[in-house]
């Protein structure tokens, strides 16, 4: 056989094998976390989601209610902050594409996507935690909002740009004002793409650990102390408890990891369903 | 004379420009906060903060040194916060991640674009998306409980006993938590991100060029090699942006890197990365003079690396034009 074809055969085999090796870990991660976490959730039943973590010497590990409450509170508030801000900024860059501010926002947003999220935690620590002297759920919300902003912005810009120009021209021809065109036509038509960006950003925020370390800090004696008290979050709890030597806390970490996995997969599927292309 | 813009248009402009400016403000604040808090430690330790390998928290503040003179050995007495080991750990783990991640990336792109049937390609592309968004702490717990011990037993121990004379593998792996494990875990995490970048460029190669290559009777290997050579800038860009991702990852790395102040050529030893150093030492750092400032000096270099690498990566990405 010609050497060239032998090389080609070997190359093809290597590519296929390496490609399969590259995606194997994610299956193993899902299976492994389910294997370690699901039994703990089943053992503790509903109380796993409604109790606070028990003492390390207790018979049962208790529950992850503070983590769930904190994640819910911080993700929702972060969304409420990030979505309007980033969407309006995206509308700006679509409406005024040649403005110098547009170029600056695009560069900034790309940079923010790449910035280590722990630095965002440090920023909020300096701006909010140090002056007030306390870790708060709200500080965590702000940190997560900053994590979300570049994602929402990027996807919103894409969605808004895909709105056909003819629709917008028709709206102006009807005598609509700019604000009316933006909110009644552009945003309405792009709503599916916007929703997808939000779903992706929420998934990111929900899974973030680093920005919460020095802002929400973690609090496990009550389910939720209020926006001005320290708060727990699912990834934060998993991160801190898995590093301890206590069986009870490690059990909570595995159960929490499984819960986080299920939440992530649900949002992933939601974002997929929203992708179904919009037809004009 | 051009007609004046109506008032309602001006209102729209400003109510959109305000949120846009806020986003820019956030990035400026990030830079300013890191720089602002870091400055005091430069006033005492100077450039040596980045060139020394001693991490010695103490209530006794660091001794004043010459600010612009990079030293290798810090003063004997008092606290000292040298970031070199953390910078080294970041570089080593990120480079390991890039070497492995690039292999995975090229294989995945070639497989999805040239080998797999359409249905298989769609499945793969969904899986890659799934990997991209998976919360990093989940990679971390898996790395801590499974990947670390696995690599320890089946990779690090055998490699150390057979190739121990090579400095890279010379230290005996004591546990699964090493800078090598961090690199492997990071390679899995950055692969989907790099795939997205390379795949997009690969698809942008004009069909006429591909047809011409086939018509010359090239084998698939020769054809793929030619295609990849046409998108080299975007591969370089994926390396840089992947490096940025790998160096800034915190939660997963902190769980598997071993967290020890350590500098050396051996990759089977526990180490710190800049982000894991910050994550681990932040809370107690407020009790010691200048320690918090030193951690912000680490954050500053992480931010600067991130911004520089990101900018070069984006510029390179633009060079792929057909």
Image: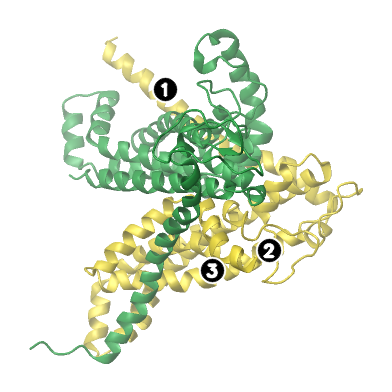
Chain colours: A yellow, B green
Q: Please provide percent x and percent y for residue A25.
A: 57, 35
- Position above or below: B271 against A256: above
Q: Earlier in the sequence, mark 2 or mark 3?
A: 2
Q: Residue at x 63, y 54 (%)?
A: A213
The residue to which callout 3 is attached is A79
The residue to which callout 2 is attached is A70
Counting the numbered discs, the total is 3
Q: Please provide percent x and percent y for residue B159.
A: 56, 14
A7 relative position to A71: left or right: left
B59 relative position to B87: left or right: right
For marks 2 and 3, give the CA distance: 14 Å
What quarter of the picture does the N terminus of chain A occupy? Answer: top left
Q: Are marks 1 and 3 on the same chain?
A: yes
Give residue B315's mark: none
- Position above or below: B35 against A5: below
Label 1 close to label 3 by CB (< 8 Å): no
Which of A58 and B89 lies nearest the eye of the viewer? B89
Give residue A13's mark: 1
For marks 2 and 1, give the CA distance: 48 Å
Q: Disc 1 is attached to a residue of which chain?
A: A
Q: Are marks 2 and 1 on the same chain?
A: yes
A169 relative position to B290: left or right: left
Which of B241 and B219 lies nearest the eye of the viewer? B241
**Disc 3: CA contacts within 10 A as few (<14), some (14-19) or many (>=20):** many
Q: Is residue B36 visible?
A: yes
Q: Residue at x 29, y 40 (%)?
A: B234
- Position above or below: A73 against B272: below
For marks 1 and 3, give the CA distance: 46 Å
State which mark lies toward you, 1 or 3.
3
């Amino acid at each position: 056989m010609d050497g060239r074809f032998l090389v080609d055969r070997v190359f093809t085999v290597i590519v296929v094998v390496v490609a399969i090796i590259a995606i194997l870990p994610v299956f193993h991660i899902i299976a492994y976390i389910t294997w370690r976490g699901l039994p703990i959730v089943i053992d503790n039943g509903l109380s796993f989601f409604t109790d606070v973590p028990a003492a390390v010497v207790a018979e049962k590990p208790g529950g992850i209610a503070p983590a769930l409450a904190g994640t819910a509170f911080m993700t929702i508030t972060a969304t409420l902050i990030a979505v309007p801000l980033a969407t309006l900024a995206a509308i700006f860059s679509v409406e005024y594409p040649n403005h110098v501010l547009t170029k600056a926002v695009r560069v900034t947003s790309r940079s923010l996507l790449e910035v280590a999220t722990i630095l965002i935690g440090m920023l909020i620590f300096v701006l909010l935690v140090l002056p007030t002297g306390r870790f708060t759920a709200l500080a965590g919300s702000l940190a997560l909002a900053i994590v979300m902003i570049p994602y929402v912005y990027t996807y919103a810009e894409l969605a808004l740009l895909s709105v056909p120009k003819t629709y917008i021209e028709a709206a102006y021809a009807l005598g609509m004002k700019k604000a009316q065109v933006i909110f009644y036509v552009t945003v309405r038509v792009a709503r599916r793409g916007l929703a997808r960006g939000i779903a992706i950003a929420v998934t990111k925020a929900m899974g973030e650990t680093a920005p919460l370390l020095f802002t929400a800090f973690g609090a496990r004696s009550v389910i939720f102390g209020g926006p001005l008290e320290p708060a727990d979050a699912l990834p934060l709890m998993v991160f801190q408890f898995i590093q301890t030597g206590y069986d009870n806390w490690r059990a909570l970490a595995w159960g929490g990891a499984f819960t986080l996995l299920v939440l992530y997969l649900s949002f992933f599927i939601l974002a997929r369903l929203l992708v179904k292309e919009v037809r004009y | 004379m051009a007609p004046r813009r109506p008032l309602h248009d001006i209102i729209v402009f400003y109510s959109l420009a305000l949120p846009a400016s806020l986003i820019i403000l956030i990035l400026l604040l990030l830079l300013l906060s890191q720089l602002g808090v870091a400055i005091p430690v430069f006033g005492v330790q100077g450039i040596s903060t980045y060139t020394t390998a001693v991490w010695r928290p103490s209530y006794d503040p660091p001794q004043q040194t010459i600010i612009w003179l990079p030293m290798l050995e810090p003063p004997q007495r008092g606290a000292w916060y040298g970031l070199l080991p953390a910078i080294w750990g970041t570089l080593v783990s990120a480079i390991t991640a890039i070497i492995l991640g690039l292999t995975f990336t090229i294989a995945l792109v070639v497989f999805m674009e040239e080998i797999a049937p359409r249905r298989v390609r769609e499945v793969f592309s969904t899986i890659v998306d799934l990997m991209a968004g998976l919360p990093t702490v989940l990679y971390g717990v898996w790395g801590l409980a499974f990947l670390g011990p696995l690599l320890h037993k089946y990779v690090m121990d055998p490699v150390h006993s057979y190739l121990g004379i090579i400095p890279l593998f010379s230290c005996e792996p004591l546990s699964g938590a090493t800078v090598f494990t961090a690199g492997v875990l990071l390679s899995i995490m950055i692969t989907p991100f790099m795939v997205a970048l390379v795949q997009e460029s690969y698809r942008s190669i004009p069909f006429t060029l591909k047809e011409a290559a086939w018509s010359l009777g090239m084998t698939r290997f020769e054809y793929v090699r030619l295609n990849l050579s046409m998108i080299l800038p975007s591969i370089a860009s994926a390396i840089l942006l992947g490096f940025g991702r790998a160096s800034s990852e915190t939660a997963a790395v902190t769980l598997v890197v071993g967290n020890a102040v350590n500098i050396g050529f051996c990759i089977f030893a526990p180490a710190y990365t800049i982000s894991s150093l910050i994550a681990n030492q932040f809370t107690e750092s407020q009790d010691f003079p200048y320690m918090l400032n030193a951690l912000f000096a680490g954050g500053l270099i992480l931010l600067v690396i991130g911004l520089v690498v990101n900018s070069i990566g984006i510029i390179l990405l633009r060079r792929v034009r057909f």
